[in-house]
Amino acid sequence: MLDVATARARILSGIVACGQETVPLGSALGRVLGLDVHARRANPPVSVSAMDGYAARAQDATEAAVLHVVAEAPAGHPTAHIIQPGECVRLFTGSQIPAGADTVIIQENTQREGNRITLTHSSAAGRFIRMLGQDFAQGTCLLQAGTRLGPKEIGLAAAGGHAWLTVTRKPRVSVLSTGDEIALPGDPVCEDGIFNSALFMVTACLQQAGAEVLMLPSARDTTRSLTEAFAQARQSDMLVTIGGASVGAYDLVRQSLTDIGLTLDFWKIAMRPGKPLLSGHIGSTPIIGLPGNPVAALVCSTVFVAPAIQRMMGMAVADTLPTEPAILGVDVGPNDQRQDFLRATLSNAPAPDSLPVVTPFASQDSAQLHILAQSQALIIRAPHAPAAAAGSPCQIVRLS
């Protein structure tokens, strides 16, 4: 059986980014930039007031000075008046600084009577002025290609004057679950049947990673049903199957894929849960066969499929699984030849500067979805790891 690190690296080595497309700024959340974004104009585009107050010459803005208010200039309505000695212009936050002024006297530091103000405090040159280009100059590279766009990045692109952005296309992923015993939630189900939780969990995981997911109708445990289902995924960037990849008499996915041109990279990995993982490709289309067990399907999706989706979106994804350190909350026993991913809860560290405490559930039965739903992390136990006492360091992968 292949080890987890090698399996992940081999899956990711065959993944390339999808092509590019241009989308409106309002639809760009979560997308990955395909081209650098440069400022179309400076921000601010002119020097503006940072506060409500009065624009004046700093040499006139001394304590107890009396200035004559000659104009009012709300934001968006600049004045053409050039400030002369002894004059000021009423401004508001965002108002353009009029010619001749080099300071803003905040209104709290004035007493106004009619068209005259008396200063209660002095105001130095440059005070409360946001200078032209203080945030960024025209032509500045605001965002680099490969950046995933969150709210902050979208705001910055908008400030730079961009209504459209060039991004990497979302990968189109078909997800096919197999098995005579599964039914959609709410549909009639046979006595020993189960509702198809794996399909919806895996789909949600891949959508969270950024994919456009097509949930194919479930295939029965026959070669014909599988072949017909595979045909519906021909236009996809990736096919993910759930179940039917083990060694049972009705596990027909691997052979059925081979019949239509699968080039198998590997099958079976030294991992628990998730041993019967399949990876290969048909032409240039990656194929990943997940275990049918719902918990194993989600764990394998987290470790292998989600990062492949992110790489297809144009993100920089490491071949190695990103982990973080934690402290065991209880004793754990020795491990066998497979790498374990133990479902666990996280609790606050005993001290602000110490690591979080992670406690595995006593039962790790891979059919228990209730335990999975309560888990905040997976504890990684290396093959043949010795027993470890509570308080020992460990590595975890957080679950979202």
Image: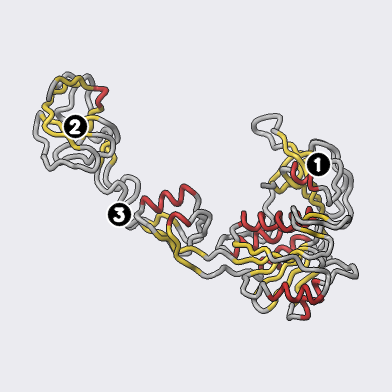
Q: Residue furthest front?
A: 188
Is residue 371 placed above or below 290 in the rendered structure? above
Q: CA distance from mark 2 to mark 3?
A: 27 Å
Residue 213 placement, left or right of 245: left
* Residue 282: % across, % down: 69, 77
* Residue 348: % across, % down: 69, 33
Which residue, given by chain and number where applicable, does mark 1 sit on? Answer: 360
Amino acid type of the residue that numbered disc 2 sits on in the rendered structure: Arg
Q: Residue at x 16, y 33 (%)?
A: 89
Which mark's residue is nearer the viewer, 2 or 3? Answer: 2
Q: CA distance from mark 2 to mark 1?
A: 65 Å
Quadrant of residue 274 within the rendered picture: bottom right
Which residue, given by chain and number where applicable, does mark 2 sit on? Answer: 90
Which residue, given by chain and number where applicable, does mark 3 sit on? Answer: 41
Is residue 92 placed above or below 194 in the rendered structure? above
Q: Residue at x 23, y 43 (%)?
A: 76
SS class of the residue under badge 3? loop
Q: Residue at x 13, y 34 (%)?
A: 71
